[in-house]
Amino acid sequence: MTHHLLDRDISDSDAAEAPEFLVLRQNPATRAYAQVGRLSCTGGMYEFRYITHGEGDQPLPEFPDLHQVYRSPHLFATFANHVMTPRRDSYRQYLRMIGLDSHTPDPFEVLARTWGDQVSDTVQLLPIPRVDGGGGLQTRFLVHGGRHVDPEAAALRTLRVGDQLDLRHEPDNVQDPRVVLVLTGAADPSQQRRLGYVPAPLAPFIHALWDAGTDFTVIAEHINLPGSRLVSNQMRLLARLEATVGRDFDVEAALGS
């Protein structure tokens, strides 16, 4: 899928609801993710800053100075190129795939659901969930690895929007012992069926919720069956996680920042 630079700015009202993102970069050799910066928007201005700036750190090409705070009224090309332009004929279909077809969303709304995930790019954005006054938070993620654990989408076809999903730690996974499996919800665990995995950058957050004894719910928010136009391997299932956390729960620490 080809992406183009967005020319739509984010308004002040949009920015009030937009999340902040941790900017991640994947090591092509190890496939591990490292947090390199933060992307936010306040007062209609986008801002990017590095989290670390130690000796030997490699800057992103658009942001060569590790110590500078970058600001712009336009979304930086590094991140705008991860959002489909509204000028594409397939734009409305793309929005339907991520459950945003009821309105024209701002770029942060799209990134909060897709994380800017691209096969050809090592940069990804992890939304930082906001906690409301009652301790509630929510975040969305596209379930990964569905074509491996459910190649014919047999389990996916049993799902309906609004169905509850289950998450399970898979400690014997040789590639990543912290991996979190996504399954269909069922009272009898033996009846659960595999759908895929929580994206690797979010797995530490799930483990932190478990470690804190936090009850949370995961819902199937949008389903794209294989064969649908534009559906990629990572866009089969959009899930929404909802939780209520205690006052001492540190969201950013849970994300591994």
Image: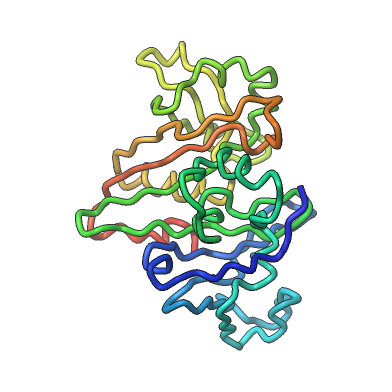
* Residue 155, image quadrant: top right
Q: Is residue 108 left or right of residue 42?
A: right
* Residue 151: percent from left, percent from top: 69, 21
Reply above or below: 189 against 145: above
Q: Is residue 219 left or right of residue 36?
A: left
The residue located at (53%, 78%) in the rendering is 47
Q: Nearer the viewer, residue 93 or 26?
A: 93
Residue 179 visible to the viewer: no
Residue 92 visible to the viewer: yes
* Residue 181: percent from left, percent from top: 53, 32
* Residue 62, image quadrant: bottom right
The residue located at (43%, 63%) in the rendering is 18
* Residue 175: percent from left, percent from top: 68, 39
The residue located at (49%, 71%) in the rendering is 40
Q: Nearer the viewer, residue 91 or 35?
A: 91
Q: Nearer the viewer, residue 44 or 177?
A: 44
Reply above or below: 153 against 42: above
Reply above or below: 42 against 224: below
So how many labels did they put on this image? 0
Reply above or below: 201 against 60: above
The residue located at (56%, 83%) in the rendering is 71
Q: Is residue 204 left or right of residue 123?
A: left
| Colour scheme of the picture | rainbow
* Residue 193: percent from left, percent from top: 52, 18
